[in-house]
Image (cartoon, rainbow, N blue to C red):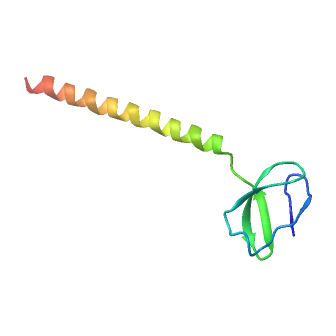
Amino acid sequence: MATCPECDAEIEVDEFDVDKGDQLSCPECGSNLEVVGMSPLELDLAPDDDDDDLDDDEEKDEDDVDEDDDEDEDEDEDEVEE
């Protein structure tokens, strides 16, 4: 048995069927939960996938800006050499 950190409902989980990092949902409130401890079995709110996607997009945008900066520097160097 484990307890939902969101609604404090008792959740029946077979410790042999889950591993640390596994995700499941609370049957009472529907929260996405992650197994964070095995002995005793402990659940925590799972990170939102949407947040991860936004972080990835932000990193891509930063990479695009860095690449643009590199191209500008190359152009400046070409002008100086002429």
Q: Is residue 25 above or below residue 49?
A: below
User: Of residues 18 and 66, which is closer to you in this image?
Assistant: 18
Q: Image point 52% across, 36% down: which residue?
A: 57
Where, by quadrant of the figure, is residue 50 drawn?
A: top right
User: Left or right: 56 with respect to 10?
Assistant: left
User: Left or right: 70 with respect to 53?
Assistant: left
Where, by quadrant of the figure, is residue 69 drawn?
A: top left
User: Left or right: 20 with respect to 53?
Assistant: right
Horizontal and vertical percent for residue 70? 28, 33
User: Of residues 39 and 30, which is closer to you in this image?
Assistant: 30
Q: Is residue 43 above or below residue 78?
A: below
Horizontal and vertical percent for residue 74? 21, 30
Horizontal and vertical percent for residue 12? 87, 66
Q: Image point 58% across, 37% down: which residue?
A: 54
Q: How many marks?
A: 0
Quarter of the picture containing the N terminus is bottom right
User: Left or right: 48 with respect to 41?
Assistant: left
User: Of residues 6 and 71, which is closer to you in this image?
Assistant: 6
Q: Image point 77% across, 74% down: which residue?
A: 15
Q: Image point 64% across, 45% down: which residue?
A: 49
Where, by quadrant of the figure, is residue 18 drawn?
A: bottom right
User: Of residues 19 and 79, which is closer to you in this image?
Assistant: 19
Direction left: furthest residue? 82
Quarter of the picture containing the C terminus is top left
Q: Is residue 35 above or below residue 6?
A: below
Horizontal and vertical percent for residue 73? 25, 30
